[in-house]
Amino acid sequence: MASRGVAGRGIDWVNVVLGAFVVLFFIFMLAPILVVVVVSFTSAGYVTFPVPGWSLKWFGHIFAYQPFVDALIVSIEVAIGATVLSCLLGVPACLYLARSRAAWASAVMTFLLSPLSMPMIVIGFASLFFLSWLGIGVSFNALLITHTIVCLPYVIRTSAGVYAGLPPAYEEAAAILGANPLKVFWHVTLPLIRPGIMAGSLFSFLTSFDNLPISYFFGSARTNTLPVVMLSYMENQFDPSIAALSTLQLVMAVAALIVVDRIYGIDKMTVAA
Amino acid sequence: MTIMKRRTFLGAGAALGAGLMTGTLPRFASAKAGNEITVTAFGGVWETAVRQCFCDPFEAKTKAKANIALGGPPQWLAQVQASPNDPPIDMLIMTPDLALIAANAGLVDDFTVDKLPNLAKIPKELTDSVKGKGTLLDYGVGGITFNKSKVKNPPKSFAEFVDRVSKGEFVASVPSIAYAVTPIMLIWAMAKALGGGVNDVDPFFKAMAKMKKNLVFWGGPNDFFNHLSSGEAELGIYFDGRTWNHFDSGATWIDFINPSEGGSLNGVAIQKPKNANPLAWPYLNEMLDAKNQEKFAEILSYGVTNVDVVYSEKLKPRITPWQKTVFPPYEEIAKVRNDWVDRWNREIGR
């Protein structure tokens, strides 16, 4: 490659420009996050940048304000619940549909993935009326059902992607050697599609945890999630608590990724996704 | 890197699921109980004020419990619309336009003195503004907020505001059309101040065309404050109560003027959904109590509506009596609102 220089052959301008672009891109992406992190350590009673002094008091305020704590617990419960339900429903569905060549299978798969293409606020609004009509109404159950609807496509998409790429010969060999379908699934299929399930679960958890448009319609005294409480707080309060809360969420997300990487390996999941 | 074994993976999943079910089982139970009501509040200091000023006296008197649902009026209205026979919340905090929608849809009960003795102390005009199916609890005034370290001689009226911003004396921050109250606090209020009204908003759009080069737009209250604190704008159209909240938070460079033509009154309405728990009545009555409202105003720096309320020395200069504001014709505005939004998008576009 003529344009790629080596030491002693002058400046490689292509690499310099590409490197500068990457640096600028990262600055563009990370600078707003950095500002939020910095503001969360301000000593001022309002959001301002640069900060006039440093303090940890806004982190203390998060835990002193009970609705934040309650909503954080609800958010974690809903995110875990929706992820578990998505796996319980999504994995069997993908095993059945991924290798089918029938036209209806493709239609069903498209249907299961359709929440991805619908505005979440429409799903939330429609679900509120539908579930209320069913008598479930504004409740934790309703929140869990609706979150599962939007989380399901992530598990199906990643699991089906992995499963469709596996040679059927592995399962056939196990069956020929006498394994019943449950054993084939247990000892062969599940270990092989695990990267897809893990990747889908991670996307599912994060999608549910950050979700506002759906949770908004199901918020009540006992089922408000963190994004709903944050929105309501931001509209009427101007202190840097939200910046501190965002920093805390960021730390939690990074910590979760590190833990997942340690026990499983992010590289496997990104390949699956 | 530790490789997770299948048994560990499945075991962890099962444990997680079991833990989740155990932890959330209480949530599956209905939140409704005879001696509990669900009341609404905005987040932050609003929630604190509602808890201290209304929930505590209600619980002390009735021995019942008031659970607070945080959120916003569109969310609560949708929840009542979805379940009118068994509403999940027992009292509503609404913007007047949404309160009228609820009233017109027959979703809320009439407010009468026999149910709410303290209603007798609320000016009739405020109850009539939501057709008697609710009343106003508090109000803010949409006027001119400015950075007094940069603006020594602020405009005293909307007309002067338009004139001086047009000339480039200031950069002004005004609400964008994305903000729900913009049609009232900006379009209608400025049109009226400049000689127009609900049926003639040309003066407003002409003024905006003149000021165009010296305007920035805010989509939410925090944007406005950021515009002023960063120096991007020197003044703008904003609310009195929020201005004083900023002041009390340490931004002592901020100040507010009610324009001489009168800023728009932006009320907060309270209502009771039909079929809600009757315990909501004593709670609503606490909300209309003079002493409770005094305490509420002290925390939020907004005007309240009981005529017996006596503001503290700190609040007196901050609160604009509602009679010195202009009362928006919410219902008429609702009819032309879409046309205004359409015209805004075509002529202003931000």
Image (cartoon, coloured by chain):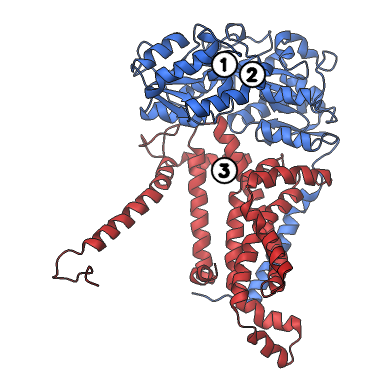
Chain colours: A red, B blue
Query: Circle 1 is placed at which residue position?
Result: B188
Secondary element under disc 3, as helix, strand or loop, is helix
Q: Chain of mark 3?
A: A
- Give the mark nearest the N terminus, 2 or 1: 1
User: Which numbered mark, 2 or 3, is in the foreground of this view?
Assistant: 2
Letter of the chain that mark 1 sits on in the rendering? B
Query: Are circles 2 and 1 on residues that touch, CB within 8 Å?
Result: yes
Residue visible at 85% across and 30% down in the picture: B275
Residue pictured at 42% horizontal, 33% vertical: A44
The correct choice, above or below, for B173 with respect to B290 in the image is below
Q: Residue at x 72, y 66 (%)?
A: A88
Structural distance between the alpha carbons of marks 2 and 3: 42 Å
Element assignment for label 1: helix
Whole-number angstrom distance, CA of label 1 to CA of label 3: 42 Å
* Residue, disc 2: B333
Location of residue B7 by image quarter = bottom right
Instruction: Name the secondary structure under disc 2.
Output: helix
